[in-house]
Image: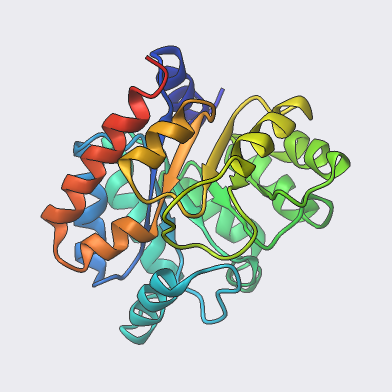
């Protein structure tokens, strides 16, 4: 069982869901993004999902696009993401990296897996890579004991759900809605149906992301999902400083952790 799987199981066995926090590395600068990750862990985040800034973020909404472009303009690169992972891995929470696959391909798939594992990383989330085109990454991740996390969506067929569930280690990332990342006023029952379908297809752990922005959302999703993923709302709060972001993180963590009690 991987570090991420143990973190999720500890929360679900205690009557809730894991809280997974997304941050863009390099926003507003490298040091502050590391400080923000540390603050989130101290306020209850069970894992950090560090986003690698990318110039063509196809599934990202306005907030993550803005933070990613800011980080790129400031010179943030793949090595800085690995530096952020290495800085926080000793705290014990799983350090995941979320990235489109082109930066991994350019870095070298084997080299990226090696260096992520060496930095203390737990695994990789690849939103634009599907399992049937991921043999090289799956092999490298297996060699270096890294989680491999793929996405499913409400449009995924049962066959696709089964294939993705079998290929994942750590959890299956369920996109709560069709579209891009970002804060939404409500999370409808599409997410609950997708989680149920993904479990029926063989997934042991399913975490939900996209559109999750409030403690009420986290409590609702934590009632049926194994993990709750929040990004845009935290990054928006981080624009006002680490302390406001940490306060929101604490609310989200408490709601996620107590969702099934």
Of 26 and 64, the residue lying toward us? 64
State which quadrant residue 237 falls in. Answer: bottom left
Q: Position of residue 195 (x, y in %)?
A: 64, 34
Quarter containing the C terminus = top left
The percent coordinates of residue 247 (x first, y second) are 16, 46
Q: Is residue 31 above or below residue 253?
A: below
Along the line of sight, which residue is nearer the eye, 144 or 211?
Answer: 211
| Image position, residue 157 (x, y; %) | 84, 45
Quarter of the figure that contains the N terminus: top right
Indicate whether 29 appears above or below 183.
below
- Residue 161, relative to residue 71: is it above or below? above
Q: Quadrant of residue 75?
A: bottom left
Q: Is residue 171 left or right of residue 90?
A: right
- Left or right: 10 as drawn, with respect to 45: right
Q: In the rendered view, does 97 fall on the left or right side of 150? A: left
Q: Tell me which residue sits at (84%, 39%) in the image.
A: 158
> Is residue 251 or residue 76 the one in the foreground?
251
| Picture coordinates of residue 83, whole percent (x, y) | 34, 60
Residue found at x 53% / y 28%: 2
Tell me what residue is drawn at x 31 percent, y 40 percent.
Answer: 215
Q: Is residue 100 above or below residue 132?
A: below
């Amino acid at each position: 069982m991987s570090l991420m799987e143990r973190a999720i199981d500890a929360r679900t066995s205690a009557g809730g869901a894991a809280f997974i926090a997304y941050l863009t590395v390099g926003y507003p600068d490298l040091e502050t993004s590391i400080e923000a990750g540390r603050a989130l862990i101290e306020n209850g985040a069970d894992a950090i999902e560090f986003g690698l800034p990318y110039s063509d973020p196809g599934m990202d909404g306005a907030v993550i696009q803005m933070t990613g472009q800011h980080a790129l303009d400031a010179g943030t690169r793949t090595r800085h993401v690995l530096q952020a992972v290495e800085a926080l891995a000793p705290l014990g929470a799983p350090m995941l990296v979320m990235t489109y696959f082109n930066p991994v391909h350019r870095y070298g798939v084997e080299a990226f897996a090696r260096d992520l594992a060496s930095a203390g990383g737990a695994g990789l989330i690849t939103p634009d890579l599907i399992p049937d085109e991921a043999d090289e990454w799956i092999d490298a991740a297996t060699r270096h004991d890294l989680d491999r996390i793929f996405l499913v969506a409400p449009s995924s067929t049962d066959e696709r759900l089964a294939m993705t569930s079998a290929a994942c280690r750590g959890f299956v990332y369920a996109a709560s809605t069709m579209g891009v990342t970002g804060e939404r006023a409500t999370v409808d029952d599409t997410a609950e149906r997708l989680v149920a379908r993904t479990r029926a297809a063989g997934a042991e752990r399913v975490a939900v992301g996209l559109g999750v922005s409030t403690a009420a959302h986290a409590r609702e999703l934590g009632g049926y999902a194994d993990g709750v993923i929040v990004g845009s709302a935290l990054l928006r709060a981080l624009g006002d400083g680490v302390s406001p972001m940490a306060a929101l993180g604490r609310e989200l963590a408490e709601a996620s952790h107590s969702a099934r009690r």
